[in-house]
Amino acid sequence: MTPSDPKLLANIRIVLARTSHPGNIGAAARAMKTMGLSHLTLVDPAVFPNSQADAMASGAADVLENATVCTTLAEALAGTTLALGVSARRRDIVAEVLTPPEAAARLLGEAQAAPVALVFGNETSGLSNEELSLCQGLVTIPANPDYSSLNLAAAVQVLSYELRQAWLGRAAWPQPEIDAASGDEMEKFYVHLETALGELEFLNPGSPGKLMLKLRRLFSRTRLAKEEVNILRGILTAAQEAKAAPRNRNPQ
Ligand code: SAH
């Protein structure tokens, strides 16, 4: 796809997780529309729809009207192949920390092939560990280290601006990964992995510790293809079957 193809921006979701102030939702919608983005997804917003959101959106009422409201982040990320969490902190959780221009280039590269998402956290608590574990990378706005927390809608504006600059052709994009596994496929794989590791007694389901988080980080770094996920799930199933019925194997 060439730069400035509208289909690219249409493949980018801006996801706001557990937003407290409806005014921020409206201001985020306005920030998006000024940069040509239109897909807003709200995960469990405290108040929506709301007149403060409408007032702050100003001429971007259409972005609010078309917003998708979900109960969980996993639902909001359905069908995406790349989700980047936007956070000033939490560098320990995800594989990779990107600057806004790097994130924009990566997202547009991937958006040539499939939907992608940028995930913003709650105004007070930011993104939770669980929310970040569903993201394959982290974007940090390099702000004043003494006061680095931007208003939510201001953070949306910075990232939307960078996406537009990249979209206008002011940055080189990588080619999309061939047949990358979608977020849903990766989540199913993680459920299968956790179940199998429990059955194999490698993981104690009662106290899983940080093992799953560490394994998620490992697999996020490699960006698995669909076929590779199928191979890994095949190996898990074989291991589960061998554990369940060890005597049926090597009958001699
Ligand atoms: N007290 C929260 C700040 C939340 S600000 C915290 O420490 O995480 C609301 C949201 O704006 C954040 O969850 C993040 O998505 C975004 N944000 C604000 N400042 C940012 C920065 N410097 N870099 C990246 N994202 C930022």
Image (cartoon, rainbow, N blue to C red):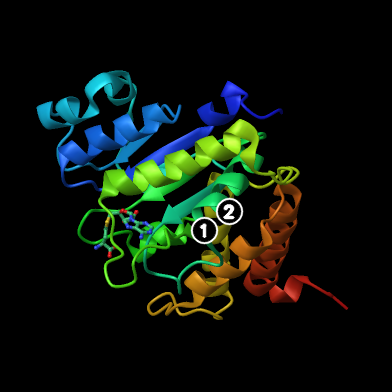
Q: Position of residue 40 (x, y in %)?
A: 37, 33
The percent position of residue 30, horizontal first and vertical second, equals 30, 30
**How many residues crowd around disc 2 within 10 Å: few (fewer than 14), some, or many (20 or more)?**
some
Does the Cβ of the disc 1 residue fall within 8 Å of ligand 1? Answer: no
Q: Residue most toward the left?
A: 51
Q: Which mark is residue 99?
A: 1
Q: Quadrant of ligand 1?
A: bottom left
Residue type at mark 2?
Answer: Glu
Q: Disc 2 to disc 1, how far (Cα)? A: 5 Å
Query: Which residue corresponds to mark 2?
Result: 102
Q: Position of residue 54 (x, y in %)?
A: 18, 25
In the drawing, does residue 52 fall left or right of residue 184? left
Q: Which mark is residue 71?
A: none
| Disc 1 residue type (three-letter) | Thr
Marks 2 and 1 in Cβ contact (< 8 Å): yes
Q: Quadrant of residue 200?
A: bottom right
Reply above or below: 191 against 210: above
Residue situated in front as seen by the camera: 71 or 252: 71
Is residue 26 left or right of 81 when viewed as pictured?
left
Q: Is residue 79 visible?
A: no
- 76 versus 9 height, above or below: below
Picture quarter with the C terminus:
bottom right
Where is the N terminus found, in terms of image quarters?
Answer: top right
Q: Secondary structure at mark 2?
A: helix
Looking at the picture, how far across and down is residue 95, in whole percent?
A: 55, 67
The residue under the point 15% across, 26% down is 55
Q: Residue at x 55, y 46 (%)?
A: 104
Q: Which secondary structure lies at badge 1?
A: loop
